[in-house]
Image (tube, grey):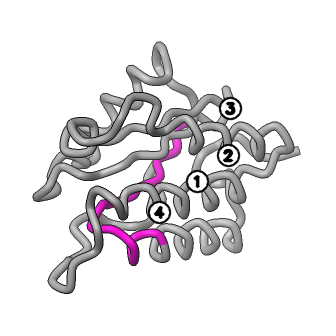
Amino acid sequence: MRVTYPVFFFTKKEKAQILAAIQEAEKNTSGEIRVHLDYKARGPVYGHAQKVFQRIGMTKTAQRNGVLIYLATRDKKFAVLGDVGINEKVPEGFWNDVVGIMQSHFKQDKFAEGISEAALRIGEKLKAYFPHQANDKNELADGISY
């Protein structure tokens, strides 16, 4: 049985896998991807994830192109949020396939795999709108926050 406390939710190997996926994804795009874990969402998961998005500084990218993968570990609820720079450019339902990837893996208790594959897919999708530039810098930390 998986421990639900966020800091212990992933093994060291799983954390490394997620970090590697984020770094690989960000090679394709100037977008910034972060993962945040909470024990449980306070209120509706999407609304709580929006508050976390603000609190952890996801709005501080130059192009407002940050993406948050949020997971409430006890409830096994999650959300994928893009900043305003992304939402102004992408079509409605842009994140549906990412959500589907995560749901598929999460149903099998493969949370690290789901987040890793989702991060890679986010990088591919954002490449069309925010391609990686030679002068890109990593504006946000890539690790998992709690």
| Residue bearing the label numbered 4 | 124
Report crowding for label 1: few under 14, some 14 to 19, many 20 or more residues within 10 A (C-alpha).
Answer: many
Q: CA distance from mark 2 to mark 1?
A: 6 Å
| Residue bearing the label numbered 1 | 118
| Left or right: 6 as drawn, with respect to 35 | right
Determine whether label 2 and label 1 are within 8 Å by CB: yes
Q: Nearer the viewer, residue 135 or 88?
A: 88
The image shows residue 129, relative to residue 83, as above or below, that is: below
Q: Amino acid at mark 3?
A: Lys
Of callouts 2 and 1, the N-terminal one? 2
Q: Secondary structure at mark 3?
A: loop
Determine whether label 3 and label 4 are within 8 Å by CB: no
Point 82% across, 45% down: residue: 109
Q: Secondary structure at mark 1?
A: helix
Q: CA distance from mark 1 to mark 4?
A: 10 Å
Q: Nearer the viewer, mark 3 or mark 2?
A: 2
Point out which mark residue 69 bears.
none
Determine whether label 3 and label 1 are within 8 Å by CB: no
Magenta part of the protein: which range?
25-38
Determine whether label 1 and label 4 are within 8 Å by CB: no
Q: Nearer the viewer, residue 131 or 115?
A: 131
| Residue bearing the label numbered 2 | 101
